[in-house]
Image (tube, grey):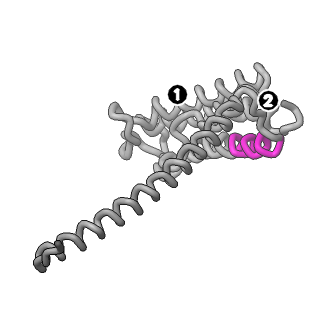
Amino acid sequence: MFTSISAFQATTLILLTFILIYHLLLQNRFKRLQNQFYQLRQTVESFDSHTEASFTPSSHIIDEQLQTMKLQCYQARNAVHKQTFGPHSKEMEFAPKQIPTVYEQLRSELSTETNELIEQFWVTYLQFLETHWLDSRGKLRSVFTGDETKKTGDVGQMMHAADRTVQQLDIFLSELSFMQSDQM
């Protein structure tokens, strides 16, 4: 009844057995991964059920954000102040180029008056930046016409504007209530 099998048939039978075992192992692993994925999805869905609206940042986080905002305001102010002595491109290169993103996170935590002051501060600063430092492509200028010592030409206009802008920024900074987190 039994016929002898050739070496080729034996090899094929062994390979098919290994393939079947490998397939069963992969199928088992796939089921475990599928279960883990299902559990992870349930965890994410339960996390999503706690809406962002119910999240209230702790006072520690708000204080950190306030300090970051304060630092960025002073960084912008100091960059403009440096320009009162002549063009300092490195100072402007490292100065903020837009309203800090931390402000968007803080906006709801601050009073209307404070929000208006912050916005006026940044509008004033960004207007100086765009008028005197950014070229038509939005890049920082590197050449100014005029005499720095006589404050003539583009450099003179920029230095005079820096004087006026620093005075305005100082007024905003002195009025801002966010400088002390207990005055929000």
Mark linked to residue 175: 2
**For the residue labelled by badge 1, is the local secondary structure a helix, a strand or a loop?**
helix
Report the front residue among 91 and 28.
28
Residue 178 placement (x, y as % from top left): 79, 34
Magenta part of the chain: 59-70
What residue is drawn where x is 77% and y is 37%?
Answer: 57
Mark linked to residue 180: none
Q: Main secondary structure of the magenta part?
A: helix
Give yes or no for residue 36 being in the magenta stretch. Answer: no
What residue is drawn where x is 87% and y is 32%?
Answer: 183
What residue is drawn where x is 41% and y is 36%?
Answer: 134
For residue 65, above or below residue 118 = below
Amino acid type at mark 1: Gln
Report which quarter residue 176 is drawn in.
top right
Amino acid type at mark 2: Glu
Residue to which mark 1 is pinned: 127
* Mark 2 → mark 1, Cα distance in angstroms: 20 Å
Q: Residue furthest front?
A: 1
Residue 43 placement (x, y as % from top left): 64, 42
Image position of 139 (left or right of 84): left
Report the front residue among 48 and 85.
48
